Image: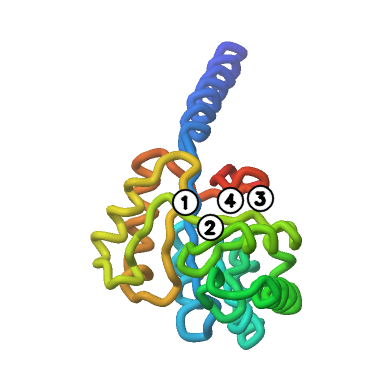
Amino acid sequence: MKKWIFGAALLAFSAATAVTPAHAAACSGYVGLTFDDGPSNAHTPALLNALRQNGLRATMFNEGQYAAAYPAQVRAQVSAGMWVGNHSYTHPHLTQQSQSQMDSEVSRTQQAIAAAGGGTPRLFRPPYGETNGTLQAVEAKYGLRQIIWDVDSQDWNNASVDAIVQANARLGNGQIILMHEWPANTLAAVPRIAQTLASRGLCAGMISPQTGRAVAPG
């Protein structure tokens, strides 16, 4: 009887030690999935459902005008485990604006997202990826880390589902991809994005406000 108990315990211990390294190896790196231009009643719920069903978390770069118009969707983003970033108030070409106009675009969005229940953003994505020293000074004033991207999915440019999935497949540890919440092909690509990342040992992480790179969720 004692031998059987010892043997069972040894087997259980072996199984536990075998599982642990495999689980740890499931995330050999982290990538930053980002979705711009939300939130909306038309697109946000379906995107959040798809991400949640496929075990993905992402950073949602919201426009202030839409955060103010659809506060419930900002709260839904947070409830679904997403992170919320600032993507300006009206999505203008900020580098063509004065510093005071830039300040208004950034500060009003900080306020709109916080008022909607999204917390105070620590990440800022300039519209069109356009930036300059003046804008970066405004970002710094509000404690924001500027986030561009390493890979552009081209989903805004009518990229196919296959092309969006392939763009995600190019991501390396710490890298960030640009996507948007409104293209139908982006929504359709989510399950395959999850499969592609998992097959490469990559997990969807958060974007660090300190480094601007994707890291393990804190």
Label 3 and label 2: CA atoms lie apart by 16 Å
Res. 57 mark: 2
Q: Is residue 117 visible?
A: no
Secondary structure under the numbered disc 4 in the rendered image: strand
Q: Earlier in the sequence, mark 1 or mark 2?
A: 2
**Pointer 3: what residue?**
209
User: Which is more foreground, mark 2 or mark 4?
Assistant: 4
Q: Residue at coordinates 47% horizontally, 51% vertically from top-left?
A: 176
Q: CA distance from mark 2 to mark 4?
A: 11 Å
Q: Earlier in the sequence, mark 3 or mark 1?
A: 1
Q: How many marks?
A: 4
Three-letter code, disc 3:
Pro
Answer above or below: position of 114 versus 3: below
Image quarter of residue 86? bottom right
* Quarter of the view holding residue 89: bottom right
Amino acid type, label 1: Ile
Looking at marks 2 and 4 on the same chain, the residue that comes earlier in the sequence is marked by: 2
| Residue 6 spot, x, y in % from top left | 59, 15
Name the residue beneath numbered marker 4: 207
Give the structural element (helix, strand or loop) at label 1: strand
In the picture, the disc for residue 176 is 1
Residues under numbered marks 4 and 1 in contact, where contact means CB atoms less than 8 Å apart: yes
Taking the spot 48% from the left edge, 66% from the top edge, the residue there is 35
Q: Earlier in the sequence, mark 3 or mark 2?
A: 2
Give the number of the mark in front: 1 or 2.
1
Closest to the observer: 200 or 4? 200
- Of badges 3 and 2, the one in the foreground is 3
Are the residues flagged by discs 3 and 1 in contact, CB closer than 8 Å? no
- Cβ–Cβ under 8 Å for marks 1 and 2: no
